[in-house]
Amino acid sequence: MNSVKIITIDGPSGSGKGTISRILAEQLGFHYLDSGALYRLLGLVAVRHGIEISINADLTQLAKNMDVSFQSKADGHNIVLLEGEDVTDELRTEETGALASRVAENPEVRSALLERQHQFAKLPGLVADGRDMGTKVFPEAQLKIFLTASIEERAKRRYKQLLERGENVKLRALEEQVRSRDERDMNRKTSPLAVATDAVEVDSSDLTIQEAVDRVQNLAILRGLL
Ligand code: DC
């Protein structure tokens, strides 16, 4: 029987893992899990239903029962539906990101979301992107990547994105933000951002997106996944 092939791509924000994972999944014809979106969705739905993020039992129930679906449109765009409503753009805001990082600190919420994440592992394979994909969610993955980039480079990427959106920001301030977010992600008690012992580290600082995708794809070939 064919087993599901799993590639995990973990790393800090701004490392490029979202873009690289999405392209890789498309190239390989694999499914794609954006695990950060689940934490973002939970933050969003909690606010919409007036549920206090600090009330454990309510938030955990919501994590188990929230009505979300990930869909691919005919034009190749992926959209995310929450209770039937398209929330794709709302998911990406800084505000939703901040909510996500609060709900992500809760260990019971993390366990409640495990089953949902496991359901993405379907034939022929999965590319799973997040912080704890290789360490906690799919420890059996055949290829684990830890994608990094220097703080300066990640701040520069964010700077460009925000400028394009017409936001007025300072590069220095962004560098500080990236530094403190790294610290929070790596030092939280439950499932901190960490390199799995069997992960391959890829530094994307000096790579184009396509070069980074090719590097991961070559590693997958070496592991006999393709
Ligand atoms: O990757 P992202 O920016 O969409 O993630 C949003 C938040 O969710 C971020 O604060 C880290 C958290 N997260 C997590 O704790 N574990 C994951 N597997 C994915 C994201």
Image: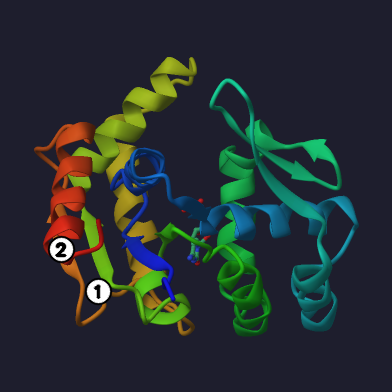
Picture residue at 51% right of the left edge, 53% below the top: 34
Q: Outermost residue toward the right?
A: 49
Q: Amino acid at mark 1?
A: Val
Q: Position of residue 127 (x, y in %)?
A: 40, 56
In the figure, 162 relative to 96: above or below?
A: above
Give the position of the N terminus as an image quadrant. Answer: bottom left
Residue density around tag 2, few if under 14, some if 14–19, many if 20 or more, within 10 Å: some
Picture residue at 13% right of the left edge, 51% below the top: 218
Q: CA distance from mark 1 to mark 2?
A: 8 Å
Is residue 104 visible to the viewer in this orientation of the structure? no
Image-based side of 30 in relation to 221, left or right? right
Give the position of the C terminus as an image quadrant. Answer: bottom left
Q: Mark 1 vs mark 2: which is more N-terminal? A: 1
Q: Are marks 1 and 2 in contact (CB under 8 Å)?
A: yes
Q: Which residue is mark 1?
A: 195
Image-based side of 189 in relation to 118, left or right? left
Q: Position of residue 11 (x, y in %)?
A: 31, 59
Residue density around tag 1, few if under 14, some if 14–19, many if 20 or more, within 10 Å: some
Image quarter for residue 199? bottom left
Q: Amino acid at mark 2?
A: Glu
Q: Which residue is mark 2?
A: 201
Is residue 4 visible to the viewer in this orientation of the structure? yes
Q: Nearer the viewer, residue 223 or 128?
A: 223
In the rendered structure, find residue 113 and report the number of the disc placed on it: none
